[in-house]
Amino acid sequence: MRRLGGRDIVAAILIALLAGAIFTSRPLQTLQGLSLDILTALRGKVVGERRDPATSPVVVVAIDGETYETPPFKGSPTQTWTREIGRVLGSISDGGAKVIGFDVIFKNSIEQSEIPFGDAPLGARMRGFDRDYLIALRQISDNGKLVLGEILSNDHPEVPYRAQRLAVRNNVRALNVHTDADDVIRRMPLSFSIEGKPVPTMAVELAARALDAKVEMAPSGAAGLSGYAIPSTVPNTLTLNFRGLSRDVPTFSFADLRACVEKGDRDFFRRAFEGKVVLLGTVLNFEDRKLTSMRLSGGHDGTPSARCALPAAAGTAQKARSDVAGVFVHAAAVRNLIERDGVTELGFPSRTLLTIAFAAVIACAAGVFAPSGALIAWLGLTAVWVVVAVWAFVHALALPLTEPALASLAALAIMIGYRFVLADRDERFLRKSFAFYLAPEVIETMVASGKMPALGGEMRNVTMFFSDLSGFSSIAETMTPVELVTLMNEYLSAMTDIIEGHGGYVDKYIGDSIVAMFGAPADDPAHARNAVRAALKCHDTLAELNEGHPAFAGHGLSHRIGLNSGEAVVGNIGSRRRFNYTVMSDTVNVASRLEGANKYYGTAIMASETTMAQTGDSFAWRELDAIRVQGRGEAIRVFEPLAETGAESAEQAKVAAAYAEGLACWRAREFAKAADAFEGVAKIDPAAARFAKRANVLTQTPPPPDWTPVNTLEGK
C-alpha cells in the first residue's frame, strides 16, 4: 500500500470526472436503462415479490390462441367478432368493472367491405352487423366505463373506425409507449398534445377513472393524480415498475368469457371484475410482443384466472420469457399509478455526481493499492452498492448501477496506467536502485511511506552504525585467499542480513568494516532502537558463528561496533557521472571514532549519549565514560548497551552497578574508592580492569586542581 500524493489526488479526481462524464453521456444513455433491467432482475431473484393476483386492481381479458381455436371464432375474421365482444363487455360492465380499456384497435368494420358478393358489395349485405356492438359501446361509454385505444403517428396512425368513435363519444386515448434507443420499453408517456392541449394516455386515463380523480397536467410535463406526484425523470413519462413481473395480473381467456355469457353466469363476472380496471388485448406468441425491463429476469403474460365455462386448455402454464404481450405494459402502468408505485429515477446531475464519486473512490484505491488489491476493492464496493441499489429498488427508487460500476472500472484501469507511466516511476527507480542494498520489507516500507530519497541530498535524523573486526589483518595473513573470501562472505552476509532485517541500509563495505545507517533511505522514527538491537544481534551472531561455523573455526573473531545518532546529509552524492547513495556529517565521523574507542575499554559496542537517549527505556545501559575523540574538542558521554530492558543477566547487573559506583567516585576525585569498586569486577569486565589501573595511577599521583573526568583518546 502506498500513500497518495497531491499529484495522485489531482489525477484521481480528473480521471473520475472523465470516466463519470463519459459513462453518463448521451451516447451511453442506454446504460441507464440497463440499470433498470438489472435491478428488476435482481429484485425478482432476491426478493421474489410474489403477490396474490386477487389483490391486483387490474385484470386482462386476453384474445389469445385459445380464442382463435374455439368456436365460433375459429376460422372467422376478427371483424366478425364484434357482436360477441360487445356481449362480453356488457357482462363485464354489469359485473361491476370500474373501467374497460381497449388495447386492440378495430380499424374497420365488415360493414365497410367492398368485396363483391353477388350483385352487391359484402358490406352492403352485412349492413347492421355491428349495431349491437356499437350499442354496447355507447351504453358502457355513457356510464364512464369505456376507453378505446388509438396509435398516434404522423405517418401511419391507427384509430378505431369512425362509427366506434362516435359510439363512445370520442373517449379514445393513445396507446403509444416510450421506446428507448435499444428498443426496450421502460417508460410510459403520460400525455400527448392534441390540438394544443395535453390529453392523458390510455393508462393515465384508466387510472384516473378508477380513482375517480382528475389528472393534473403541467406545461413542463409534470403530472399528478389524486395527490400522487407522478415521478418523471424523463419529462412527461412514468418509469414503469414491473414489481411482480406480470405474474400478479389475473388473465381471462376471451373464449371462456364468451362461453360464460352463453351460460348466463352473472355471479362469475361479478366475482372476477367488480372494482377492477379491465384491459382487453391480444395475448399471442408472435404478435404485439414487447421488450421491457423484465427482459433479463423473464416476464409473464399474466396468471390464468379461474374458468367459468370452458375447461382449461392443455399447455396453458405460463413460462417466463424475455418479451411480454403489449397489454401487460399498460397493465403495469395502470397499477403503478393506482398504487403510487412508479419508479423514481435520479436526475442527470445526481446520477453524474454519484458516478463520479464512485469512480473517484476506486481511482484513489487504485492509487493506494496494487492492481490486484484495487480490483478487490472495486469488486467489494460494487457488491455493496448492488445491495444498496436493490434495497432502494424494492422501495421503487432506481439508483444508477451500471454507470458507477463501469465508470469506476474504467477509472481503475486508467489510474493503473497512470501509475505505471507516471506516478510509479520514482517507485520503480527506487526499487531498482536499492534492490541490492536493502531488505525487501524495508523497500516496501519506504514505498508505503511515500518519502523517497532526494536527489542531491537531504537532512535526516539517522543512527550511524560502524563495525570492524578486531586484529583481522594478522588473522588474514594466516589464510589462503579462498579461505579469506569464504570467511568474509559468510561474515558480511550474516551481519548484513541482521542490519537489513532491522531496517538498516548498508552504505559500504571497507574491507572487513561495515558502514550502515538507520533512518534512511527508509524513514524510521525508531532508527536508534533498531540500530542498537541490530548491534546486539550482530554481537550474538558472531559468537554463534565462531562456535559452530567451519569457516570461523580456530579464528575467534571479534568485532567492535560504534553507534551515533544525529542529523546527517543523505542522498545521491558523487560526481556528475557516477554517484552513490551515502551519508555525510559529523554524526558519521563520531560513530567511526566510537567504533575505534571500544579498544580502549575492551568493549564490543559503544554508543553515544544521543543514541542512548533516543532509545528511551528499551535497553539496559551502563555509562562507560566521557571521552574526547580525535578531531573533536567537545567531550562525549559514551554508553554500552547490555541487553533489552529486563533481559540483562545477574552478572551484567552486578558489573553495571559496581562500574557505576566506581565511575561516580572517579568523577568525585575519590580515586582510591574508585579503584576498589572497579577491582571488584575487574576479573570479569575488561572496562573495569582498565579503569582500575587508571584510578590506581591517579591515587599515587593526584591530578591538578583543574582536572576534568574526560578521557582524551589519542588514536582512532
Image: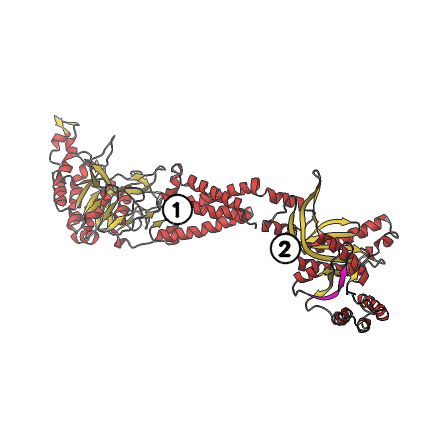
Whether residue 360 is situated above or below residue 532 in the rendered picture: above
Q: Which quadrant of the structure image shows residue 426?
A: top right
Pick whichever, 370 or 253, lies toward us. 370
Instruction: Between label 2 and label 1, give the one nearer the viewer.
Output: 2
On the rendered structure, is 611 left or right of 363? right
Pick whichever, 454 or 348, lies toward us. 454
On the rendered structure, is 25 left or right of 579? left
Q: Label 2 sits on what residue type? A: Asp
Q: Outermost residue, right direction?
A: 478
Measuring from the top left, give residue 267's x and y in whole percent: 17, 54
> For the point 14% across and 33% down, which residue is it?
111
**Mark 2 or mark 1: whose residue is earlier in sequence:** 1
Pick whichever, 6 or 483, lies toward us. 6
On the rendered structure, is 429 left or right of 99? right
Q: Label 1 sits on what residue type? A: Pro
Pick whichever, 299 or 364, lies toward us. 364
Quadrant for the C terminus, please: bottom right
Measuring from the top left, give residue 711's x and y in whole percent: 79, 62
Mark identifier at residue 400:
1
Per the rendered image, the range of residues in magenta is 615-631
Measuring from the top left, give residue 407's x and y in whole percent: 45, 43
Mark identifier at residue 524:
2
Packing grade of label 2 (10 A; few <14, some 14-19, many >=20) is some
Whether residue 147 is situated above or below residue 636 in the rendered picture: above
Element under disc 1: loop
Q: Does the stretch in magenta take in 131? A: no
In this rendering, does residue 548 appear at all? no
Q: Which quadrant of the structure image shows residue 163?
A: top left
Packing grade of label 1 (10 A; few <14, some 14-19, many >=20) is many
Whether residue 516 is situated above or below residue 679 in the rendered picture: above
Question: Pointers 2 and 1 in contact (CB under 8 A)?
Answer: no
Q: Does the stretch in magenta take in 623? A: yes
